[in-house]
Image (tube, rainbow, N blue to C red):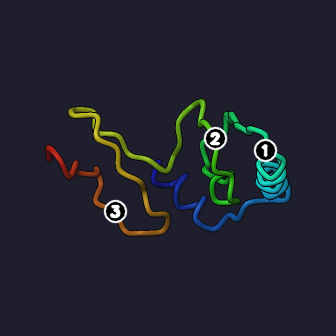
Amino acid sequence: YAERRARLAGIAPGPVHLALAALEEEVAARGGRFLLISQNVDGLHRRAGVRAYVDLHGTLLIDRCTRCAREREVELGAARELPPRCEACG
């Protein structure tokens, strides 16, 4: 996933991501409820400002330990130890 994450660091949310974030704000302003369920794993909806969303297939932006299941958010573009070492159980 390191290569996919590296490519993602240079990509910005597009017009559709921004439109969905604006739609969420509009729905909330009218007292409605909004939930975006996405198959995308790139985190661009969140980076566009969408707050209520579910990543149906997970995300490239979170590491999950296979031993203790602790999750850690990945910082795009940051140098990383490979393989990543769990902060909780090593």
Q: Residue 80 got which mark?
A: 3
Amino acid type for the residue under numbered disc 2:
Tyr
Distance (Cα) linking label 1 and label 2: 17 Å
Q: Counting residues from the N terminus, which is met first, the one under dot 1 or under dot 2?
A: 1
Q: Residue furthest front?
A: 31
Expressed as whole percent of the image width and height from the top left, the position of residue 55 reads 59, 37
Residue drawn at the location 63% of the way across and 68% of the way down: 10
Residue 17 against residue 40 in the figure, above or below = below
Alpha-carbon distance for marks 3 and 1? 42 Å
Residue type beneath disc 3: Arg
Instruction: Give the image quarter of residue 47.
Output: bottom right
Image coords of residue 24 (percent x, y): 77, 49
Q: Position of residue 45 (x, y in %)?
A: 68, 51
For label 3, the SS is: loop
Give yes or no for contact between labels 1 and 2 (Cβ–Cβ under 8 Å): no
Residue on which the image places disc 2: 53
Report crowding for label 1: few under 14, some 14 to 19, many 20 or more residues within 10 A (C-alpha): few
Q: Is residue 75 above or below residue 42?
A: below
- Which mark identifies residue 31? 1
Which residue is at the front of the view, 84 or 48?
Answer: 48
